[in-house]
Amino acid sequence: MPTVPKNKDAYAVLKITDFRNYAFARFFITFGVQMQSLIVGWQVYEHTKDPFSLGLIGLTEAMAFLSVGLFSGHLADIYNRKKIIVVSAIAFFICAAYLTFLSFNLTQCYALYGIIPVYIGVFFTGISRGFIFPAQTAFMAQLVPRELYPNSSTWNSLLWHVAAVSGPAAGGLIYGFYGINIAYLIVLVFILISICFFVLVRPKPIIKKSVPEKLFKSLTTGVKFVFNNQIILGALTLDMFAVLFGGAVAMLPVFADTVFHVGPKGLGFLRAAPFIGSVIMSFTLAYYPPAVNTGKKLLWCVAGFGICIILFALTPSFYLAMFLLMLSGMFDNVSVVIRSTIIQLFTPDEMRGRVASVNSVFIGSSNEIGSFESGLAAKIMGLIPSVIFGGAMTLVVVGITTRFAPVLRKLSFKDEFINNRI
């Protein structure tokens, strides 16, 4: 009978060379993309002074992401995942190079086309992200033994959040001190470094299907699997609506400009605050993984996230706002680690790409659609009421999930290992 995995070595997965190269690659590409996201957000808001224009950034990327979401998962289950990742990372580099080129011709660009060329760059960035996300998720599960999935989820989340802390902070500071051109050039450097690390990871074999599936059946199989598994569906739904309604990140340029009056430098710190909290929580989870009462901890942490967002909207203090965003990041990280571990543990190897693509549609697109929702709500309701509304809706979603997903609520990783069900 299998025993409950003990966390004797919190650094176990970092001793695996392929995982270490993969994690560094993801760190550098995340750093570059998060830095680029902040630069684009401030660039668009600085030109338009319209919160809705920030929401359109999210909608543009979400439309691109969703257009390839399910197909990219199918591709990740039948084709070399490393090649998909490397090609997608190169596509990220090309999109960043295009935005860099625009930054050197802003006056002419704005005069002729307004902000539309920037949205075009965001759209193709979304396409690239749509292909890389399921391939990365499925590939990571092949790099470590099954018993280390919780540990790999924790460290993957930690390194991602470290990059997401430093990326926006660096973007805001470099933009503020050295200008947009230098900021975009540094984005290119970090994406290039990530490509080099991805190349170092050894490719892993794809499990061949005994009977090849037609494209439509392959796409729907992943969707049906998720909707027939209450634990996966509950975790994805909870996270999706929490991100959709509860995220205040898209509106941070407006808060930085009109509420706290701190400019792009302060915006960088506001963007970094949630990720600082996530890094702190990741180190905690590396030593104390949420093995007992996992479902209840997930629900409580998402509720805590919603409360932090409401309080953030109400505070006039820049430093208290940073603290609340940091706290929201701590709660959110617990959700990220639990959801990632659930997907790794409960998904068959031959379906990892398709399930990851469904996850990307649920979670990945909800960030961008949430940005659009935030921009639209801010335009209709006003900035502060819209963020309070989003936090309140997050609490409503937690209540509904608690009521209608009892299997998720009762989930405990410890019990699952003991009963040999995963």
Image (tube, rainbow, N blue to C red):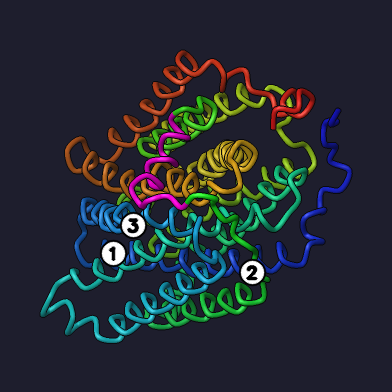
x and y, in percent, of residue 323 in the image: 55, 42
Residue 50 locus on image (x, y percent): 20, 55
Image x and y of residue 45, in percent: 26, 61
Front residue of this view, candidates 308 and 318: 308
Q: For the N terminus, give its image quadrant.
A: top right
> Which mark is first along the chain, 2 or 1?
1
Using the image, determine if residue 101 lies above or below residue 269.
Answer: below
Query: What's the amino acid at mark 2?
Result: Pro
Q: Which contiguous range is marked in magenta? A: 212-227
Q: Residue 68 carries which label?
A: 3
Earlier along the polypeptide chain: callout 3 or callout 2?
Answer: 3
Mark 3 vs mark 1, CA separation in Å: 12 Å
Residue 261 lies in quadrant: bottom left
Residue drawn 30% across the image and 51% down it: 258
Mark number, residue 123: 1
Q: Answer few, some or many: residues within 10 Å of disc 1's Cα (few below 14, many 20 plus, some between 14 and 19).
A: many
Q: From the top left corner, tell me how far across and down residue 10 is, in percent.
A: 82, 48
